[in-house]
Image (spheres, grey):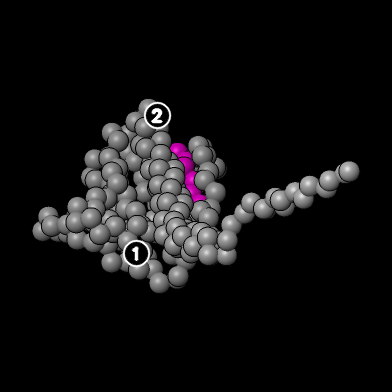
Amino acid sequence: MIRHTQKTPAYACGFTLIELLATLAVMGIVLSIGIPSYHELIRSNRLTTQINEFSSSLNLARSEAIRRGIRVTVRKHGDEWESGWQIFTDLSNNGLFDESSGDELLRQHDALAGGYTLRGNHNFVNFVSFLPDGSSNNMGAFALCDNSDDSYIPHPGASKLIIINNIGRTRIGADSNGNGIPEKETSNGNATDISSCASP
C-alpha cells in the first residue's frame, strides 16, 4: 500500500507590510537630514576650491613680481572677476595687458561655475598689481559668493573673503562669530560681517 505524505508548504521569506512601511519611514527621515547636509558639503567644497584657486593666482603674481623685479598684475578678464582673470607682467604700470609694450601673459584663469560671483572692493574693481618688493598697489578685499539666488547677499556657509594687506600678503577672512559669513576689518579696527557680495 502506497501512502502519500503531505508536505508542509514552505513559507516565503520577506517583509510584512508594517516592516516595509517602517523601513520607508526611517529612510525618509535619514534622507531628509542627509541630502541638505550633502548639498552644503558640495557647496562648501566648491567655494573652498575656487577661493584657493584665486588665492593661488594672487600669490603667483606676487612671487613673480619679486622674482622678476617688475610689476605683475592680476586683472579681470571680462565684465566681472567671475568671468576669469589674467596674470601678466605690467611694464607700462597701468594695469592693462599690452603685448606691444613687452607685457608677458603668465597665466589665464577660466570663468567660475555659473551662479558664483567674485568681486573686489572699490580698490580692486578691475585689477590688483604687485610691485617688485612684494607689496600691492592698494589694500582691500575680494568676496566669492554662491549667488545662485541673484540677491548678492552673503548667506551662511556660502561666501568667502580674501583680504590683501598693504605689504601684499593675502589671507582668508575670518568668521570669529561662527555665523558662516566672513568678516572684514573696519577703519576703527573692528571686524564686521560683509554685507554684500557685490562690494565687499
The C terminus lies in quadrant? bottom left
At 59% across and 57% down in the image, what residue appears? 15
Looking at the rendered structure, the kind of residue marked 2 is Arg
**Dot in front, 1 or 2:** 1
Asked which secondary structure carries label 1, the reply is loop
179 or 127, nearer to the observer: 179
The relative height of residue 155 versus residue 132 in the rendered view (above or below) is below
Give the residue pinned by disc 1: 155
Distance of label 1 from label 2 (alpha carbons): 40 Å
The relative height of residue 162 versus residue 36 in the rendered view (above or below) is above
At 24% across and 45% down in the image, what residue appears? 165
Q: Give the range drawn in magenta.
A: 84-92
Looking at the rendered structure, the kind of residue marked 1 is His
Residue closest to the far left? 188
At 64% across and 51% down in the image, what residue appears? 13
Q: Which mark is residue 68?
A: 2
Q: Residue 36 carries which label?
A: none
Badge 2: few (under 14), some or many (20 or more) residues near its Cα, within 10 Å?
few
| 177 sits left or right of 96 in the view | left
Is residue 131 something one can see in this rendering?
yes
